[in-house]
Amino acid sequence: MRLKHHILIIDHVHPVLLDLFQNEVVVYKPDIADFQFALALESATVLIMRSKLTLNKEWIDQAPRLQYIGRLGSGMDNIDVAYAESKGIVCENAPEGNRNAVAEQTMGMLLSLLANVPKASAEVAAGIWDRKGNQGIELQNLTVGIIGYGHVGSRLAEVLAPFGCRILAYDKFVSGYGSESVQEVTLEMLQKEADIVSLHVPLNEYSRGMINVKFVEEMKNPFYLLNLSRGEVVNISNLIRGLETKKIAGAGLDVLPNEKLDNLTSEQQKEIKYLANSQRVILTPHIGGLTKDSYKKLAEVLGEKVLQWMNI
């Protein structure tokens, strides 16, 4: 019989995860402070986290017994995975858990933009009843370009298919996924053909700032931009320039480069104010993958992965 693992959980989780770990030693500290974290790390063999902190080299070095890091989400950019793995620590996430939630929010934002919902809603609230000025566009006659064809991108394609629109997909690291409903293309072809660009990429050296002046200028058609990946993928000042020139017809952003609204630079404050006041922009506070359903599903998916690792 193996020794029990000491599992440290530092974010709020669905109770199903605690049930899965009932035979282990669990320290559940969702409100843990930094000064308490260092002490708790000393005995942890498994760490479960979301976005409470950036798990860098300094934190990892304070965890001599750590063997496994599990993230309740799809991204791993707040964890120094390379350093952890160099110390023999297994790192896993749970993108299967919130893929549908993000895809559905993407669809909600997209359909709202195409139907001029933000503008029309604001006008009605102001006593303006303008039907002609809020004429929409039907998705079935447009081409959607998905950048990043992982768990979320592929699920989005499934959700899009019944609408009858043309679907293009580009992924720098994946190939061979084309199907009857999805056309695998180069980035250049996507920029030439797409009316809508939806971003579902991890944050890395290739994706950081990829939506910039050059990208916008290389798009053949005015387009709608959706970002439900990571905020730093989009250069906000370049996005605003695209909105001003009408090359970007509208934008749905669930993420921002700086999501701490009480700690924005003066330039970031101006950018947020512009976006918030634009009737062609929808902003949400990084909730794409946060539904009541995904909250449970993430716990189930990651919990099963941890148990599988324990029993190898």
Image (spheres, grey):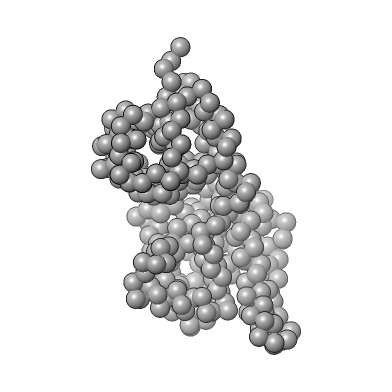
Query: In the visual, does 25 lie left or right of 197?
Result: left
Provide residue 116's location: percent of width, then percent of height. Answer: 65, 76
Query: In the visual, does 241 lie left or right of 246?
Result: left
Provide residue 49's location: percent of width, then percent of height. Answer: 44, 42
User: Does the image show residue 101?
Assistant: yes
Looking at the image, is 57 positioned above or below residue 4?
Answer: below
* Most foreground residue, 168 or 149: 149
Query: In the visual, does 4 lie left or right of 61?
Result: right
Give residue 300's quadrant in the image.
Answer: top right
Give residue 141's quadrant in the image.
Answer: bottom right
Q: Residue at x 40, y 58 (%)?
A: 207
Q: Residue at x 55, y 73 (%)?
A: 281
* Most foreground residue, 177 or 97: 97
Looking at the image, the residue that sits furthest to the top is: 1
Provide residue 176's location: percent of width, then percent of height. Answer: 54, 45
Give residue 32's quadrant in the image.
Answer: top left
Q: Residue at x 30, y 44 (%)?
A: 35
User: Does the image show residue 300?
Assistant: no
Q: Residue at x 57, y 30 (%)?
A: 19
Looking at the image, is 28 positioned above or below residue 310?
Answer: below
Looking at the image, is 214 positioned above or below residue 84?
Answer: below
Looking at the image, is 62 positioned above or below residue 75?
Answer: above
Query: In the visual, does 70 lie left or right of 185?
Result: left
* Most foreground residue, 115 or 257: 257
